[in-house]
Image (cartoon, helix red, strand yellow):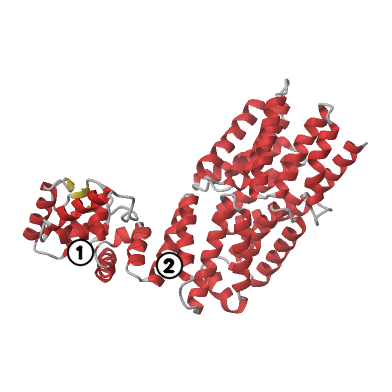
Amino acid sequence: AMQIAAAAPSPALAVPASLHASLMARLDRLGPAKEVAQIGAAIGRDFSHALLAAVASKPEAELSAALERLIGAGLLSRQGVPPHASYLFKHALVQDAAYGMLLREPRRALHARIAETLEGRFADIAETQPELLARHCTEAGLIEKAAGLWGKAGERSLARYALVEGTEQLKRALDQIATLPATPALRREEIKLRVAFANALALTGDLVGGKEHYDRALAIYDPAEHRPITTRSGRDVGVTLLSFRSSCVWQLGYPAASRNDVVRAVKNAREIGHVTTLMYALFSALFSHVYCGDYAAAHALADELIASAEERGAQYWKAIGTAGRGEIFALTGNASDAVRAITTAITSLRSMGASLYEPRHLWNLAMAYAELGQLDEARHCIDDAIDKVERSKEKWCEAEVQRVAGEIALKSPTPNLEEAEAYFDRALAVARQQQTKSWELRAAMSLARLWRSQGKPQQARELLAPVYGWFTEGFDTLDLKEAKALLEMLAA
């Protein structure tokens, strides 16, 4: 599909004054064609004949003459034949110069006209490219409308796993809402956007930023006011916030707080009695309990989630529950059942186009294959996970994917110690940069075990002791118990 408009003019770059003056002079000499250049510049670096004509509302002969003049002057190039033609400013500086000649109020009015034309006469473009409409509404000073559109653009980007782009769009939405007087409707919109923004931050590895936004959204959330709306629109936002925050705080090094959040989320979901909300809470609680090493509790949650999903024909949740069950098998020494369950889940999720969390399923599948001695399959799965983290920017699990790759390097008949150590170092570096203490503890344990086996117990202890010493709670969880036992062995 032909792009109907491209990016906004760039902020004034350091253009030599003489060049800028000569561009302005060239535009001034164009007479009535100058106005057409300005309308085009407001639309974007490239623009379609159809949109230009609709916004300019001039007689076709007059518009064509102006366009011919701009092409003749070497300022625009044309592709195709009107009315199906598109035009491109030959240089971004020409677009900037034409746009810069517009005064503030006419410029705002022009952007408002473009937005109105897009909505009224190019509805399919307004629908599929909300970021385009958002930009024109922003420039027109239609702040509330722009905020809603940036939010929609951000949610669409996240749905196709364009995490970085989505984060930027949601931030623009929240920044614009912050300039408006608070109303109940805006509060609802802000909570929804904060959830999406926090999710995007957490998925791209900014767990600290994610937690901050979950906390702020929970502070705004009022069950009486917001619960009825959100249950109609998908799932209760309060339960969603607790569920997401749980994953975030576990990674940041607070396992007990993580467990408290999911216990509350499941309790609230049961009270609300809304099925999708409950399935979501069960999924989050399942993985929180797996993280904490409560495998029996996790298994019960997986069974309930799968049964509930089967009853309602909810294929996505059934696949997620099956992946969870497979992960528990992998962690409790039942590798062949783990391979069966996780493979089934990945196949089902891929058929739905649901690739979020796939690196996690792959690292568990890799561990199960390694346990069975199928090292080629294990390496293939972990390489796939590393590749997916890199391509999708789903960075929250990068440290653990690297750590598991190191463990797999140690499993082969001739263990590659250097390769394993390099993976563990990378896992530590990522976890430290993200401040994800729970992943750092796991990576430190893996490296400490390796060093211990190489006869370097003191080095191992000096690495692990400060990481373990940072923790203030969750000492009954599996990782912390294992770290404590390992430190005792290293001190012996």
Amino acid residing under circle 1: Val
Residue 184 seen in render: yes
Rendering coords of residue 319 (x, y %)? 60, 49
Rendering coords of residue 147 (x, y %)? 43, 67
Q: Dot 2, crowdedness within 10 Å: few (<14), some or many (≥20)? A: many
In the image, residue 204 sits, relative to residue 387, either above or below, namely below
In the image, residue 450 sits, relative to residue 338, either above or below, namely above
Q: At 61% across and 79% down in the image, what residue appears? A: 224
Query: In terms of image quadrants, where is residue 406?
Result: top right
Rendering coords of residue 347 (x, y %)? 55, 41
- Viewer-closest of 266 and 427: 427
Q: Which of marks 2 and 1 is nearer the N terminus?
A: 1
Residue at label 2?
A: 147
Residue at label 1?
A: 55
Q: Residue furthest front?
A: 18
Q: Dot 1, crowdedness within 10 Å: few (<14), some or many (≥20)? A: many
Please tell me whether mark 1 sits on a helix, a strand or a loop.
helix
Residue 333 seen in render: no
Q: In this view, does 461 lie to the left or right of 138?
A: right
In the image, residue 94 sits, relative to residue 424, either above or below, namely below
Q: In this view, does 3 lie to the left or right of 160?
A: left
Q: At 26% across and 58% down in the image, what residue appears? A: 43
- Viewer-closest of 331 and 91: 91
Q: At 72% across and 25% down in the image, what residue appears? A: 417
Amino acid residing under circle 2: Ala
Q: Is residue 461 left or right of residue 370?
A: right
Q: At 15% across and 59% down in the image, what residue appears? A: 34
Q: How far is disc 2 from disc 1 in space, using C-alphas?
A: 23 Å
Rendering coords of residue 380 (x, y %)? 59, 30
- Viewer-closest of 331 and 474: 474
